[in-house]
Image: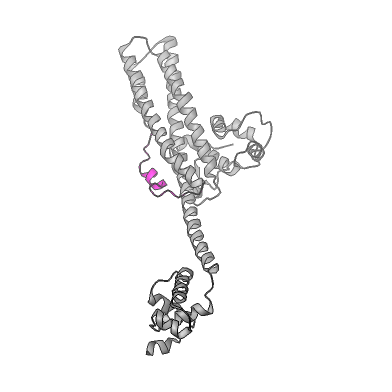
Amino acid sequence: MWLSKKKLYLCGVIHEDAMKRIKLYEADDKMIDLISDNYSMLQGLGAFGIRLGFGDKTVSEVCREQGVDCHTFLTVVNFLINGYAPKETDDKISVNTLLAYLRASHRYFLDFQLPSIRKKLEESLSQGDHLATLILRLYDEYAHDIRMHMKYEEKTLFPYVEALLRGEQVSNYNVDIFSKHHSDTTGKFHELKNIIIKYLPHDGLANNQLTATLYDIYNNEEWLCNHSNVEDVLFVPAIRILEQKLKKDDVSARISSLISNAEGQESISEREKEIIVCLVQGMSNKEIANQLFISINTVITHRRNIVRKLQIHSLAGLTIYAIANNLIDKKCFTSD
């Protein structure tokens, strides 16, 4: 028998150590068994883009055929059903899959769930009743707050994550900023539920309609709670891992670039080495020309090439280069 920890720990999280005795859904379980035992996951299937009609296929088979990352799907499923929270270092979770799931969940909630409950609430309240009008206004205010909350994520967090997935660094935003400002929406309908229960008793059909609508509002609140927890417990750590990976990749790329530039650096000619030694010894262009029996213009050209090849502009830098490459004797130079 499956244990539904979601009902016992609403809006809570059960971590890995506390889950050892609870069987979790796995890739070789049948998808039909998962849904039959947990009908609340039907909407989750739609958010993942999984179509019904999968027969007796396993979870892994359905995910593979419908282009869904199986590990991420099972992570969300086991979190929503059992409250199972993986380690924050789980780098197997697909950020791209979670992003698509959350986007689809937003669309379901904003375009279907909120308008549907609003319509049911309107139908179950007495027409023209002043208190009923206030109830609808209160619902609209709460719905607006939730809509703005989700729109904020779609305008700030989601584009940021897409940039990370493209390998782009964003300097003025990160997931910690989002976490600090991620407000809780799970209590938006608490006051509304209490007002309806306490002050709007109805008889007959109207009462049945209102009771059914209240049931939908309760489910709606639980849905919001689960959605918020998926963002905080699964999505945010996955983004943080992606941020850290990009930083490491950026550092590695810079090191590789420096190594590549050093390896691809033009070699210094023997004549240029002679000129470096002369410069370190304090000779002028004219003195170098006389010493090496070349023109002053040729000396100037060689000096430009030395700067271009070594990217060293100072006499001190050339001195260090000369010592490091055994062009001059360090002891002799120091004694001088």
Q: Nearer the viewer, residue 183 or 81?
A: 183
Q: Residue at x 41, y 47 (%)?
A: 174
Q: Nearer the viewer, residue 93 or 203?
A: 93
Number of numbered discs visible in the structure rendering: 0
Residue 273 position in % (x across, y down): 49, 79
Residue 128 position in % (x across, y down): 34, 9
Residue 222 position in % (x across, y down): 45, 31
Q: Residue at x 46, y 72 (%)?
A: 301
Magenta stretch mostly in which secondary structure? loop
Q: Which quarter of the figure has residue 191?
A: top left
Residue 234 visible? The answer is no
Magenta stretch encompasses residue 71? no
Q: Nearer the viewer, residue 28 or 211?
A: 28
Residue 266 visible? The answer is yes
Magenta stretch encompasses residue 178? yes
Residue 211 position in % (x across, y down): 43, 18
Q: Nearer the viewer, residue 9 or 108?
A: 108
Q: Residue at x 46, y 68 (%)?
A: 308
**Left or right: 103 in relation to 125:** right
**Left or right: 305 in relation to 73:** left
Q: Which residues are magenta?
A: 167-186
